Amino acid sequence: MGGQCCNNTSYLDDVEPYDDTELKRLDTRKINIKYNYKKKQKELNSSQTTKTQERTKQLAVTLKSGGIYLGDWVGNKREGYGILKWPDGSEYEGEWKNNKAHGQGKFIYPDGDYYEGQWENDKQNGRGTFQSINGGKFEGQWKDDLQQGYGIETWEDGSKYEGYFYEGIKQGQGTYIWNDGSTYTGLWINNKRHGQGSQVWKNGKEYQGEWFEDFMCGQGIIKWSNGCTYVGQFNKDALNGYGIFKWSNGRSYEGSFKHSKPNGKGKVILDNGRSRFGEWNEGQLIKWFDNNQDEQKENFDILNLEDL
């Protein structure tokens, strides 16, 4: 926001458009949340002050930046309601206080994206909506030009996040819905699934348990649509550590896993209900701990999670 002279009264350049910034998010889809302006606050010198402090309206004033302002003034300050248009096509229309966007207003970016909502001291503060021309949208709370508090973020492909933000990132409790219908509900830290949460995939697979930096990691339960279940430890989305895997036909393996396969000592319950103890290496049976080594030498290979 800047100034040239009009009616022999000049106004200093005080703000200019700020560089666009992209927010990192869960996958390749992004909403480019654009921030307000970079401040260049300068004190007006005595030759530019006026004695009157009553709110007045003037004809369009051209500022030093080339922007044109039409609206209310108090002395030499933009105060009240007004419209400021920049040469690059950006525009702010709304309330002003002490030369700053303050109150309710709408800022339109040169490419057509816009923010409409509450402002304080030239920054998006309070409740507002950012709308991108490509279909991305955020509705919710803002603090100092960043999403903060509860909000709803949607993307052009239909994906959606509804939950809490802190300094522009997903943080706290929230639900993410992918455009294929898969969902995650739980805790987020630094834009990643982290803590307790549950996810349901489009193929019917369900997981409930602990997450670490966007991976299933820690204690959890997973169920597949074919009836298989696993209860135990995970590491980076894989069965890893102690756990119990059950097939839909009643057969099960209980013991140590590594990379989603039996690894180490474990116990199996066969289709007929008989229990046997054995030892495995990366899913391959090494030996049974009984005298019937040739009887039912199943390897009990466990498929990777992506295959079930």
Image: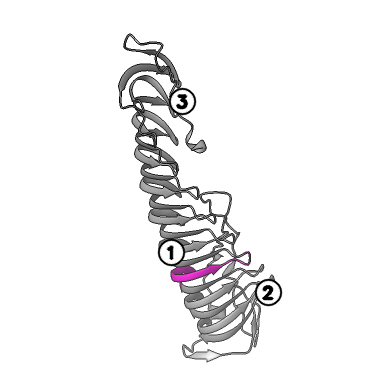
The residue where tag 2 is placed is: 66
In this view, the residue in front, 292 or 244, is 292
Q: Position of residue 18 (x, y in %)?
A: 59, 62
- Characterize the local packing of mark 2: few (<14), some (14-19) or many (20 or more) Cα atoms within 10 angstroms: some
Q: Is residue 39 visible?
A: no
Q: Is residue 298 left or right of residue 36?
A: left
Q: Which residues are magenta?
A: 119-134
Does label 3 or label 1 sit earlier along the sequence? 1
In this view, the residue in front, 219 or 307, is 307
Circle 1 SS class: strand
Amino acid type, residue under disc 1 in the picture: Gly
Q: Is residue 92 left or right of residue 291?
A: right
Does label 2 or label 3 sit earlier along the sequence? 2
Is label 3 or label 1 in front?
Answer: 3
Q: CA distance from mark 2 to mark 3?
A: 71 Å
- Characterize the local packing of mark 1: few (<14), some (14-19) or many (20 or more) Cα atoms within 10 angstroms: many
Instruction: Give the quadrant of residue 262.
Output: top left
> Please, is residue 288 above or below residue 218 in the view?
above
Amino acid type, residue under disc 2 in the picture: Gly
Q: Residue at x 46, y 25 (%)?
A: 301
Amino acid type, residue under disc 3 in the picture: Asp
- Characterize the local packing of mark 3: few (<14), some (14-19) or many (20 or more) Cα atoms within 10 angstroms: some
Q: Is residue 65 magenta?
A: no
Q: CA distance from mark 2 to mark 1?
A: 36 Å
Q: Quadrant of the N terminus?
A: bottom right
Q: Residue at x 57, y 86 (%)?
A: 71
Q: Position of residue 113 (x, y in %)?
A: 61, 68
Instruction: Give the quadrant of residue 131.
Output: bottom right
The residue where tag 1 is placed is: 151
Residue 301 image label: 3
